Image (spheres, coloured by chain):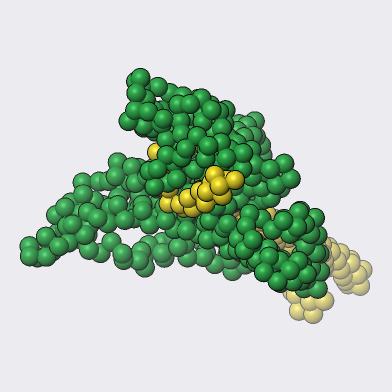
Chain colours: A yellow, B green
Amino acid sequence: MTILLLLQQVDPPTPSLLQVDAGLVFWTAVVFLIALGILWKYAWGPITEALDERETRIQESMQAAEKALEEARKIQADNERARREAEQEGQRILREAREEAERLRDEEVQETRERIATMRDQAQDEIAREKQSALDDLRAEVADLAIEAAERILGEALDQSRHRKLVENMIEELPQN
Amino acid sequence: MPVRQHCALSTGLFLLALVLLLGSPGLAHAESDVEGDPNAIGHSANGYYLDVMPIGKIELPRLLLTRHADGLSFDVYGTTKEALQSGRYVITDGEGNVLSEAEMQYAIDQKKHYNFPLAAASGPGIIIDFSITRHLLAVFLSALLLVIIGLRLGARYRRGIGREEAPRGVWQNMMEVLILFVRDEVAKPAIGGKYSRYMPYLLSVFFFILIGNLLGLIPWGVTATSNIMVTGTLAAFTFVITQFSGTKDYWRHIFNPPGVPLAVKPFLVPAEFIGLFTKPLALAFRLFGNMVSGHLVIVSILGLIFIFAAQFGAGVGWASTLLSVPVTLFVWMLKFAISFIQAYVFTILSALFIGMALEDHEHEHHEEEPPEPHEALLEQAEEYVPGDGVSTTERPTPQPTV
């Protein structure tokens, strides 16, 4: 009993929170190094590499998309410009054609008008000429008739050429129409 | 807000029920002694046993490199008890006095023997104690979990999920957030251009500490990072990496600081030299202190229940749970936050030390200068995409990077 009472006084020493423990340091170092080695090769290495790769790719695709958008915009602008130019060209052609047609029509009218005028002039000339010849004929006829009448009246044949001269002088004195 | 309150309340009630269920035998025979001492230090310190509440304490193997009288040997025992029963080892009272055979037997009967320091029965004694302690078990478990998580995650990326396609699932996205955080918020700003070389170390140390911290928060959990030897080892890695990364310039700044009067150098150089070691030491103690303090506070606050029960009767003990349990819950949540914060702090400080060692002071004593304004402008200019007047205004303005 006395021994037991004595023994109860033998309490374990209070453990220290700052206990130096080389074994623990050794194990921790070994375990950590092994973990580090495994993780380096099979975890952090591939993971960081994958993340970098993914980021680069996302960055690249974003840039590519933006470039594509830029290009599309440029193409659209080009198309727009081309369309506008074509439209203008078309309008220009149409306008020119219209002007040409106008001009051609005017020319035609002018020509026709000129031709008509010429024809009219020719006709008038013809008429005048016909009239002159008719008048000449008539004059000759009248002179002959007058001579014939005078011969009958006088009954005597005068000198044909002298008579004629007389009559012609008389006709000359007659009014022209 | 009411939902969250309800959540906290139900969690509190759950914890209360847990304490009532698990704590009742404890309340009945109030821990070890009549004062109801919760033995906060004993719970937080390292030990050669695992405390698994309803089953009891499970002894852990002892691996000892010892110089006996008959020479050097590496002894392996399943338990401390076996080591003692082999006759090659004895226990002492911590002050160098070897306990007698009867005392040893009594300690074994009382299941206290693993709390006594072990010593060789003869010869110069134990050289290195490689025993599997509970903190070491926590280290093993943390590393194992980390490797499993890392391999599973790495396999996903190697399969192309997250590489060619978007990451899938909560788990991968959550881990990616942390990995990218370490890369973009820790490694890149602290180390700079050569950051990728240090990424595996920084990620390993971050996740190792994080898992170690979080393991201490689950029931029966042991916090590996609440041991100064563990945090010290990690800090030592940072120290070694820092020194091996050191440029000529870095060493010159320590042993022959430029632009310092000769008379000041005898004071400055030793200070700089000591600074080499205080940085990792502070790193080790910061993490250790943060983790062990949370542990001590939780054990102490819960221990109040047993102290009250022992001092004023079981009724008062029960009543005190109404205060102790919510406070414990609060401290637990605080520790949860601290687990992340300290993992981050350790990692960013490691990265900063490495970054400082890598730095080349091209323009003397202007290394703390913020980036030139035109560089920031240049960065903004690169962000600007010409050609579209509308989208640039809608684009969020680039945040200044830290």
Q: Residue furthest front?
A: A2
Q: Nearer the viewer, residue B346 or A40?
A: B346
Q: Residue at x 69, y 50 (%)?
A: B219
Q: Nearer the viewer, residue B82 or B54?
A: B82
The picture places residue B195, in percent across and down from the top left corner, at: 41, 46
Q: Residue at x 48, y 29 (%)?
A: B63
Q: Residue at x 62, y 32 (%)?
A: B155
Q: Residue furthest left?
A: B262
Decide if residue A2 is on the left or right side of residue B10: left
Q: Residue at x 46, y 30 (%)?
A: B89
Asked whether the viewer can see residue B313, the reply is yes
Asked whether the viewer can see residue A57, the reply is no
Res. A164 image quadrant = bottom right
Which quadrant of the figure contains the C terminus of chain A? Answer: bottom right
Q: Nearer the viewer, residue A151 or B350?
A: B350
Which quadrant of the figure contains the N terminus of chain A? Answer: top right
Res. B78 image quadrant = top right
Q: Nearer the viewer, residue B216 or B147?
A: B216
The picture places residue A175, in percent across and down from the top left corner, at: 79, 80
The picture places residue B190, in percent across and down from the top left corner, at: 40, 55
